[in-house]
Image (spheres, rainbow, N blue to C red):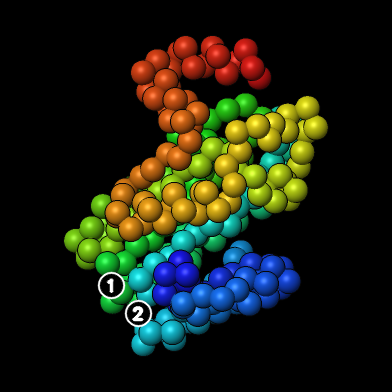
Amino acid sequence: MSDRGANVVAVARRADRLASLAQRPTVGKVIPLVGDVTNGETRQAIIDTAARVRDGEIDLLVNNAGIGGIGPFADATPDRLRQIMEVNFFAPVELTRLALPHLAHGRAAVVCNISSVLGHRAVANKSEYCASKFAIHGFSDSLRAELAPQGIQVTLVSPSTTDSEFFDSLVHTDANQTSSSIGRWTPDRVARAALAAIKTRKSEVILSAGGKALVYADRISPPIMNAILRSKG
């Protein structure tokens, strides 16, 4: 987005990644901010920094942080659930809460929540992750209706598998349940699709053909999908 003239506050836990991003030649400014979005002070700093860029206005909030866990729920700990929900649900919800007063003054403002196709159809051995994505899906749908009178759009972007560091940072991994790298979208491809959805102010977009097929099949015949997923589980 900075390539197109936007001023972007980029947030990550790794300073080296942010430094390389900030050094890229762009039309707009990239303002790096190192922090953990599950931390309340970090969230406040993110919104304060973004608001200072243009006199208290924010045009776009993208909630993109995410972690997962793979394995049977019976083998998991309560801490795994809480950690996944903190990153995937509570952090974006609270960032949105803080941003709303500034988005109300933005130009055609948008909240973009990066979810997952698993926020439309749950699968085995990813119960906490699916729960977090269903939660952000429901939050997005409700908030969209609330904010429509103010002209603020809420866009839900649901990728399938992305070829990112997501699988390197799983809270818990069952080696027998890890996903294949075949068919994964690159982060750049996901970002470009999300940007297109933001520009056209779409309410929701499911990115991959496989993801669309999964959601469509589940809507047409949930019992058949249940049988298919049980056979793969």
Count of picture labels: 2
Looking at the image, residue 18 lies above or below residue 141: below
Can the viewer see residue 37? yes
Q: Nearer the viewer, mark 2 or mark 1?
A: 1
Inspect the image, locate mark 2, and give the three-letter code of the amino acid beneath it. Answer: Glu
In the rendered image, the quadrant that contains the C terminus is: top right
Can the viewer see residue 33? no
Label 2 close to label 1 by CB (< 8 Å): yes
- How crowded pointer 1 is (Cα within 10 Å; few <14, some 14-19, many 20+) is rated as few
Q: Nearer the viewer, residue 92 or 108?
A: 108
Looking at the image, residue 47 lies above or below residue 36: below
Name the disc covering residue 107, or none.
1
Report the residue at 42% width, 75% height from top: 5
Q: Position of residue 102 (x, y in %)?
A: 35, 76
Which of disc 1 and disc 2 is earlier in sequence? 2
Residue linked to disc 2: 57
Q: Nearer the viewer, residue 56 or 3?
A: 3
SS for callout 2: loop
Report the residue at 22% width, 65% height from top: 150
Residue 50 vs residue 182: left or right? left
Inspect the image, locate mark 1, and give the three-letter code of the amino acid beneath it. Answer: Arg
Q: Position of residue 223 (x, y in %)?
A: 45, 13
SS for callout 1: loop
Report the residue at 34% width, 62% height from top: 110
Name the disc covering residue 199, or none.
none
Looking at the image, residue 103 lies above or below residue 166: below
Q: Nearer the viewer, residue 184 or 202?
A: 184
- How crowded pointer 2 is (Cα within 10 Å; few <14, some 14-19, many 20+) is rated as many
Q: Position of residue 197 (x, y in %)?
A: 36, 51
Q: Position of residue 15 (x, y in %)?
A: 71, 73
Q: Report, in whole angstroms, how far the alpha carbon at label 2 lies from the one at label 1.
A: 8 Å
